[in-house]
């Protein structure tokens, strides 16, 4: 930890990982709240309005923590990654500034109206402000993914004097093919998280015998949305994202899969430990030929192994990349199976009586968070050793004048502050869940 | 040309941030002094509750715009003022959390605690923003690669080895602190009634004298410290309009305040803040970050700007985007117009 580069990397990794625990819920929940408000508007069933109000309170706490931990992300590009910012700012500054101008104003304005304005707005206008909060948060996601996608797969640029990377085509940047799959995969992951959280708290209410009617609405909404979303995680979005990596970052694919040798009919590894010293996979449990088929749609297709690439192109932390990817896929598979089972029981009208399934739903709450975090670690570790793939190495992007000592000082500061935020968050969420869906209109004494 | 246009647009965004989030910060600073009970504190918080987050977005949007239009400035300033910026981030986090979380729990321990955090964080933020502005006027020791790093403080003298805080930047910080306190008092007076309104007016009227004094002092000192200011104002005499605006705002605040026209006083305070900021911007131009170790390494509108293509493209989304943002703001301020009921 005495190298400034290592500190800067950990600084960003820590703050972004903590930050993204909150937007992944709010982006998905924004959609589910719009759905609840729509059902309330169409059927006139006030239970759905009460359900929406409950989730808006959960949303507001998550949103507040998401906002305050989000500001450091934009600032850190300049503070800790100054050289990267100076070189690439003319390109990715576009998408980051557009996020501020197009989504933050929209989101913050209408969240204020949505949370404080239910008494004063007509039901239709209140629905509309919920919709605009949803739109703002999903736009925000788009601009951030477009930024990351450009770092994964730079397009629409030309090289200028010095290390400068200049924007050459605005639409090239916005319509980056990488953005499409990564955006869909990421946003649907947010819906998965929100669905599981909703179903989990609903299952808790049903099992505990409190607010049972609301609990059933939560379980039903969460399971229906969760089933569709978990399936869409796998296909087409996960598949599309995977084939993007195969096409543009083949060395990353090999590292994710723990594939050292180039093979025709390459297997998928279910379990195993990649030994990067002896260049082999220990204790493998394999599905033969599956990787070739999934990547190229042919059982005998050749997949390049790590040994085929020069060492200085390899991701610099292959074991962590490999485990992140396998945790994401493993948990993702479990989440799909659980949702399918619950959906089947729901369809047969037996889910609310099935204690084992309700317990499983309740306890599954952390898994989508872990899977999403592991997915992002796969994306970002997989991009290494590049900061901008093929153009700028991570080692060249950090701030030249910020010392390891100063970086470590603020990293420790963030760790302390975020620990406090995490404790406060859990305390407040516990209170809201304990208080349950209230009957009266929210807002009031704020 | 296009780079100068973006320089102006970013100055407008920063002025927008200072006017809008400025009254949130001001309300935070004064709320412990002008309120006497929980009900009054709630009213102060409700006067900013639905809008403070949107106001803070101006900072993010200005930061993003600065990033894309002047990447070299963004990189140099953010890494060079590293420690001060991290403090700003932590204070922004604490302030946001204090506003959002205080109402969740009714307890004689919880609420006063967050009120204190809200007040303290707002005060330090106003001070630090002023210090930052002072640094931009004084200049920083940029190296030949266009970077610098300065500690939080050294010997408190604004020479070439000055830290972020020296007596000059601290002076600007205090001016910012007092100006935003008055700004916040004008806002609270405008949004409330009864004793709370009376106390806010009286508080603002007292601090106003401090603002007058500090305005005179920092004008004089800045003129001495940054030779570019005198040069710019003599090269382009029309720029005198900016300090005149500030002066008009300063006097108007007093006159409107004395007549109990709270909205008028608030708008005059906004005019004062805009006038001061534009005066500084005008005085520093064409520098965006002057150097205090020789002008060769200074960052200017030209050498810090992004490539022309991107700057032209940016206008195509920035103009409609900010018009939309204006429409949202109008909508939300109209919706929550009028006094905060008790």
Image (cartoon, coloured by chain):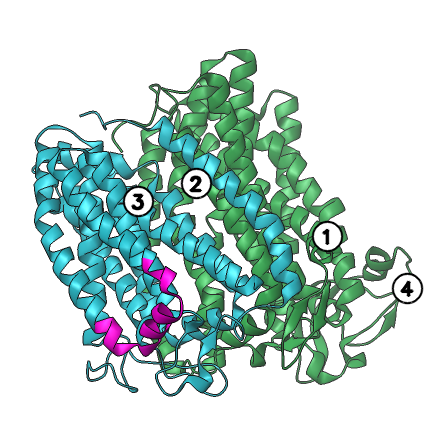
Chain colours: A green, B cyan
Q: Residue at x 63, y 43 (%)?
A: A188
Instruction: Name which of mark 1 and mark 2 comes first in the sequence.
Output: 2
Q: Find the distance from the CA under tag 1 to the CA under tag 2.
A: 26 Å
Q: Which residue is mark 3?
A: A427
Q: Which residue is mark 4?
A: A301
Q: Name the chain letter of the residue that bears numbered label 3.
A: A
Q: Which residue is mark 2?
A: A108
* Circle 1/circle 2 CB separation < 8 Å: no
Q: Of the residues tagged 1 and 3, which is closer to the observer? A: 1
**Dot 4: what SS?**
loop
Q: Find the distance from the CA under tag 1 to the CA under tag 3.
A: 42 Å
The front one of A100 and B320 is B320
Q: Of the residues tagged 4 and 1, which is closer to the observer? A: 1
Give yes or no for residue B233 being in the magenta stretch. yes
Q: Name the chain letter of the residue that bears numbered label 1.
A: A
Instruction: Name which of mark 3 and mark 4 comes first in the sequence.
Output: 4
| Horizontal arrangement in the rendering, residue B27 relative to residue B6 (left or right) | left
| Labels 2 and 4 share a subunit | yes
Q: Which residues are magenta?
A: B221-240
| Labels 1 and 2 share a subunit | yes
Q: The C terminus of chain B lies in which quarter of the figure?
A: top left
Q: Which mark is residue A175?
A: 1
Instruction: Name which of mark 1 and mark 3 comes first in the sequence.
Output: 1
- Residue B177: x, y in percent? 20, 58
The front one of A98 and A441 is A98
Instruction: Name which of mark 3 and mark 2 comes first in the sequence.
Output: 2
């Amino acid at each position: 930890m005495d190298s400034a580069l290592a500190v800067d990397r950990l600084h960003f990794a820590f703050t972004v990982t903590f930050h993204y625990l909150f937007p992944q819920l709010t982006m998905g929940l924004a959609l589910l709240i719009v759905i609840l408000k729509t059902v309330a508007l169409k059927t006139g069933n006030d239970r759905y309005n009460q359900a929406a109000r409950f989730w808006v309170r959960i949303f507001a706490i998550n949103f507040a923590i998401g906002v305050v931990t989000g500001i450091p992300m934009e600032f850190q590009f300049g503070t800790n990654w100054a050289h990267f910012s100076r070189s690439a700012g003319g390109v990715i500054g576009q998408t980051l500034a557009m996020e501020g101008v197009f989504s933050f104003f929209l989101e913050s304005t209408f969240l204020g109206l949505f949370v404080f304005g239910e008494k004063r707005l007509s039901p239709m206008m209140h629905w509309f402000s919920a919709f605009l909060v949803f739109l703002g948060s999903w736009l925000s996601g788009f601009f951030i993914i477009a930024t990351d996608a450009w770092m994964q797969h730079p397009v629409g640029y030309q090289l200028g004097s010095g290390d400068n990377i200049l924007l050459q085509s605005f639409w090239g940047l916005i319509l980056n093919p990488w953005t499409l799959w990564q955006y869909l995969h990421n946003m649907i992951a947010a819906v998965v998280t929100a669905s599981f959280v909703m179903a989990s708290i609903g299952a808790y209410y049903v099992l505990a015998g409190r607010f049972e009617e609301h609990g059933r609405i939560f379980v039903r909404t969460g399971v229906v949305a969760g089933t569709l979303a978990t399936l869409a995680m796998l296909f087409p979005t996960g598949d599309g994202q995977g084939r993007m990596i195969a096409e543009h970052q083949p060395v990353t694919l090999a590292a994710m899969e723990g594939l050292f040798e180039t093979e025709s009919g390459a297997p998928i590894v279910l379990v195993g430990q990649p030994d990067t010293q002896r260049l082999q996979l220990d204790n493998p449990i394999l599905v033969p030929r599956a990787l070739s088929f999934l990547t190229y749609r042919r059982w005998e297709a050749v997949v390049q192994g790590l040994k085929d690439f020069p060492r200085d192109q390899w991701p610099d932390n292959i074991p962590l990349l490999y485990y992140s990817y396998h945790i994401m896929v493993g948990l993702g598979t479990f989440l799909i199976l659980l949702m399918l089972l619950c959906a089947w029981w729901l369809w047969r009208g037996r889910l609310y009586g099935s204690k084992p399934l309700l317990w499983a739903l309740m306890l599954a709450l952390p898994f989508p968070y872990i899977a999403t975090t592991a997915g992002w670690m796969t994306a970002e570790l997989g991009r290494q050793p590049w900061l901008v793939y093929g153009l700028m190495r991570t080692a060249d992007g950090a701030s030249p004048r910020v010392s390891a000592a100063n970086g470590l000082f603020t990293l420790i500061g963030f760790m302390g502050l975020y620990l406090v935020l995490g404790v406060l968050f859990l305390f407040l969420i516990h209170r809201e869940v304990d208080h349950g869906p209230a009957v009266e209109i929210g807002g009031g004494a704020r | 040309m296009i780079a100068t246009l973006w320089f102006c647009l970013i100055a407008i965004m920063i002025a927008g941030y200072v006017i809008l989030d400025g009254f949130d910060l001001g309300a935070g600073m004064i709320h412990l002094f002008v309120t006497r009970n929980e009900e009054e504190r709630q009213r102060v918080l409700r006067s900013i509750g639905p809008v403070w987050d949107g106001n803070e977005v101006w900072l993010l949007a200005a930061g993003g715009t600065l990033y894309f239009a002047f990447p070299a400035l963004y990189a140099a300033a953010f890494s060079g003022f590293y420690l001060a910026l991290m403090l700003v981030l932590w204070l922004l986090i604490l302030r946001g959390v204090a506003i959002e979380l205080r109402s969740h729990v009714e307890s004689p321990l919880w609420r006063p605690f967050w009120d204190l955090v809200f007040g303290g964080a707002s005060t330090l933020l106003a001070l630090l923003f002023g210090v930052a502005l002072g640094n931009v006027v004084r200049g920083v020791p940029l190296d030949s690669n266009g970077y610098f790093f300065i500690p939080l403080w050294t010997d408190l003298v604004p020479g070439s080895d000055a830290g972020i805080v020296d007596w000059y930047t601290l002076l600007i910080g205090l001016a910012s602190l007092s100006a935003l306190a008055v700004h916040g008092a004008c806002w609270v007076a405008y949004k409330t009634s009864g004793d709370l309104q009376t106390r806010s007016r009286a508080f603002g009227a007292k601090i106003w004298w401090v603002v007058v004094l500090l305005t005179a002092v920092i004008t004089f000192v800045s003129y001495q410290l940054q030779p570019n200011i005198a040069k710019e104002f003599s090269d382009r005499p029309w720029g005198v309009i900016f300090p005149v605006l500030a002066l008009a705002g300063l006097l108007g605040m007093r006159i409107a305040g004395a007549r109990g026209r709270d909205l008028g006083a608030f708008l005059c305070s906004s005019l004062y803040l805009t006038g001061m900021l534009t005066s500084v911007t005008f005085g520093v131009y064409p520098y965006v970050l002057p150097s205090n170790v020789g002008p060769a390494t200074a960052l200017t509108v030209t050498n810090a700007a992004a490539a022309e293509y991107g700057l032209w493209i940016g206008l195509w989304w920035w103009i409609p985007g900010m018009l939309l943002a204006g429409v949202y703001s109008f909508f939300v301020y109209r919706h929550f117009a009028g006094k905060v009921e008790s």
